[in-house]
Image (tube, rainbow, N blue to C red):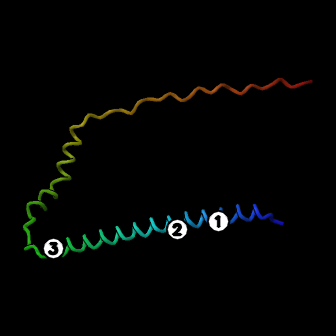
Amino acid sequence: MFHHDEIQRLLHRILERIESVMAAQADVDAAVAAINSAVAQVAADIAALHAVPAVDTSALNAAVAALPAALASVHELLPVVDPPVVDPPVVDPPVVDPPVV
């Protein structure tokens, strides 16, 4: 049977946990509101971009297409470095006691 003090202590513990859960829920609600606000801002930014007349990206596309060859040329300039040689750890053989006769 529980004593009055034990019941009070358990009820207080339950109340603390409920308050913790409610605070966590408030944090989640605030994060959801911030995400929804960001999504709305991104949607507005996308709509604004669609309103801009078409932009000529042909020079950008050509530069992007040339990147793999340029990177390959840079990699060819890098010196080849052998990985460091690491000696395996020295392991002492197990000590075996002589058989008892």
Q: Amino acid at mark 1?
A: Ile
Q: Residue at x 7, y 74 (%)?
A: 53
Estimate the spatial distance between the alpha carbons at disc 1 and disc 3, rounded to whole Å: 51 Å
Percent from the top left, x then y, of residue 11? 68, 66
Drawn side of residue 40 relative to residue 95, left or right: left
Q: Which residue is mark 3?
A: 48
Q: Amino acid at mark 2?
A: Met
Q: Which residue is mark 1?
A: 14
Q: Secondary structure at mark 3?
A: helix
Q: Which residue is mark 2?
A: 22
Q: Quadrant of residue 80?
A: top left
Estimate the spatial distance between the alpha carbons at disc 2 and disc 3, rounded to whole Å: 39 Å
Contact? badges 2 and 1 (CB < 8 Å): no
Q: Nearer the viewer, mark 1 or mark 3?
A: 1
Drawn side of residue 59 relative to residue 77, left or right: left
Percent from the top left, x then y, of residue 77? 21, 38
Instruction: Say which of 88 and 27 sits in front.
Output: 27
**Reading the chain from its start, which is encountered first: label 2 or label 1?**
1
